[in-house]
Amino acid sequence: MSRARGLVLQNALARYLRAHGFVQAESAGAGRPGTDILGTPGIVWENKTAREWDILAWVRQARTHGKKGGELPVTVYWPDKIGEGSPECALAIVPLPDLVTLLGEWTES
């Protein structure tokens, strides 16, 4: 997928996050190592638009960045034909142990 589409959807993800409570969220821009979205303390974001499905590599990338500071690694995948007008169709992928921890905290509150 083109770098341009990736950057457009990275910006769209930041806007979506701002509209849903992460008021400091902003795109990290292209080519920067680490999280793709800044301003969301405790969360590392990997934004992906590639046609070739390489989810294991994407999740490992997010986990590697997340391990540096103990952040939650989240990979957001925008399949073909899914754009900024339909973020409800993008997929947010979280490693199972992290999801179980989150769900445990959620059910306790």
Image (cartoon, grey):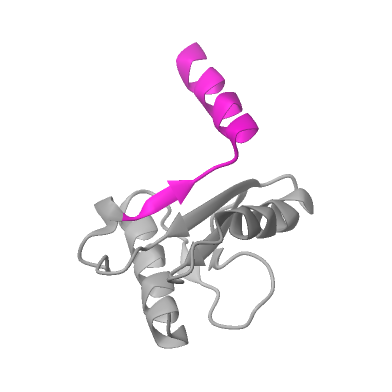
The furthest residue to the top:
108
Q: Which residues are magenta?
A: 90-109
In this rendering, position of residue 6 left or right of residue 62: left
In this rendering, position of residue 70 left or right of residue 9: right
Instruction: Count the labels in the image.
Output: 0
Where is residue 5, by image quadrant? bottom left
Q: Is residue 95 magenta?
A: yes
The furthest residue to the left:
85
Q: Could you say which is closer to the camera, residue 45 or residue 83?
A: 83
The furthest residue to the front:
52
In this rendering, position of residue 69 left or right of residue 103: right
Q: Position of residue 49 (x, y in %)?
A: 43, 70
Q: Is residue 1 positioned above or below 99 on the image? A: below
Q: Residue at x 38, y 56 (%)?
A: 17
Q: Residue at x 54, y 54 (%)?
A: 40
In this rendering, position of residue 63 left or right of residue 4: right
Q: Position of residue 21 (x, y in %)?
A: 37, 48
Q: Residue at x 51, y 12 (%)?
A: 108
Q: Could you say which is closer to the camera, residue 99 or residue 41?
A: 99
Q: Main secondary structure of the magenta part?
A: helix
Q: Position of residue 85 (x, y in %)?
A: 20, 66
Q: Is residue 46 positioned above or below 73 on the image? A: below
Q: Residue at x 54, y 50 (%)?
A: 74
